[in-house]
Image (cartoon, rainbow, N blue to C red):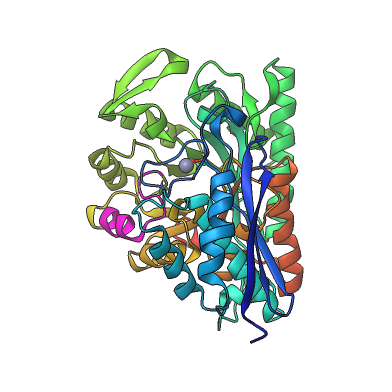
Amino acid sequence: MKRSIASVHARRVWDSRGRPTLEAEVTLADGTAGRAIAPAGASTGSAEALDLRDGGTAFGGMDVQRACAAVNGEIAAALAGRDPTQQGALDAVLIALDGTPDKRRLGGNAMVAVSMALAHVAAASQRLPLWRYLAGSRTEFCLPLPEVQIFGGGAHAGRRVDVQDFMVVAIGATDYAQALEWTAEVYRAAGELMAKAGRLSGVADEGGWWPAFDTNEEALEFLQRAIEHAGYTAGQDVAIALDIAASDFGKGGRYRLACEGREVDSDALAEMLLGWLRRYAIVSIEDPFAEDDAQALRRFTLEAGPKVQIVADDFICTNALRIAGAALLGACNTALIKPNQAGTLSETRAALDAARAAGWGAIASARSGETEDVTISHLAVGWGVKQLKVGSFARSERMAKWNEGLRIGEAIGSFALPPRCAFPWSN
Ligand code: PGA
Ligand code: ZN
């Protein structure tokens, strides 16, 4: 069979933080090849698929030789001769072969790279771009609304401020290309304002400006000012989105705001966030409480959920069962969808389907450790996920994803975004 898998190979490559990661390459009997690279998180949820890292002293213990060996040995043997278009069955083979609940034996990094490479080679075997292959029988397409980091904080900026992502969403843009233009102007304006204020000290892990601010709210104030400085109306043209990533500084209902030198409980944190929602043009807020603080998430969703998008990342870890449970509880209303949290594309798709079944929105998302891999852009368009988060508007591992959206838009023949009314309830 021409379309059968002839080889599966993994090689060690390097990510945007200069850390090892792995690239999987699947080749068919007729020579068609597809490849994908595993990304890596820094502020990870505890229920994520685990990356297999070598430990020891080399590269801070982050090497992936064992994960590469798992691909080149067991995984390659199990997939040889199979039909690459049977994504569900092949992912089931990977899951059974690993045999652990958190993918620790073969490694979530090994599995997601292979799973994504399978989709790439299957698409290539049908001479289709990946987004078109993933769309199946769908015929209507739009590009995702970009959610773009302007300041990076938390684990991505030496904990300079506690909040991790200060982002913008060009909710008033007429299409994807214009959303990128507006984002570029805001990113530049923010850099200019910071330079003028003597607050510019480089960029954080995802390309956002390193926030040299004294409080979390000062960053918010600056962001709102940058939107206006760039000539847009905050909340109408360009709005603010936050990823609090609260699991990184909170546990057991206590939250340590290190940059402000104080500790607050869930209620006080809720008050602070609700105050921000009143004072700033915020339309989306991710992980506002820690992953172990489901009741605070529920209360906050009840209060703020009708007006803003409340995004679950660490809380649900791209897991269909967790999303169903969170929806039942009424905690959050939108799922962040990260393939490497799930470990295979089929499980990622199941999480998206669970979000849709619950009436939740969804955002496709890259990780803080990224590469030139652009699978996530194709996945957003192909699966009809209406928002995309891939970090900031600088550095090629980020721009590769935004630029791929422009190429896909040309192929579709339109840069159309989801209907305006779909935000924030865009599932
Ligand atoms: P991570 O950050 O990739 O470091 O986990 C991204 C996020 O929290 O959304
Ligand atoms: Zn997050």
User: From what the image shows, is residue 71 above or below residue 389?
Assistant: below
User: From what the image shows, is residue 74 above or below residue 291?
Assistant: below
Residue 44: image location, x then y, percent: 45, 39
Residue 184 relative to residue 154: left or right: right
Q: Which quadrant holds residue 321?
A: bottom left
Residue 317 relative to residue 392: left or right: left
User: From what the image shows, is residue 186 above or below residue 407?
Assistant: above
Q: Nearer the viewer, residue 247 or 124?
A: 124
Q: Which quadrant holds residue 31?
A: bottom right
Image quadrant containing the C terminus: bottom left
Q: Which residue is drawn at the image coordinates 53% and 15% (left, top)?
A: 214
Magenta part of the chain: 314-327
Total residue callouts: 0
Residue 326: image location, x then y, percent: 28, 53
Residue 85: image location, x then y, percent: 56, 78
Residue closest to the far top:
261
Image quadrant containing the N terminus: bottom right
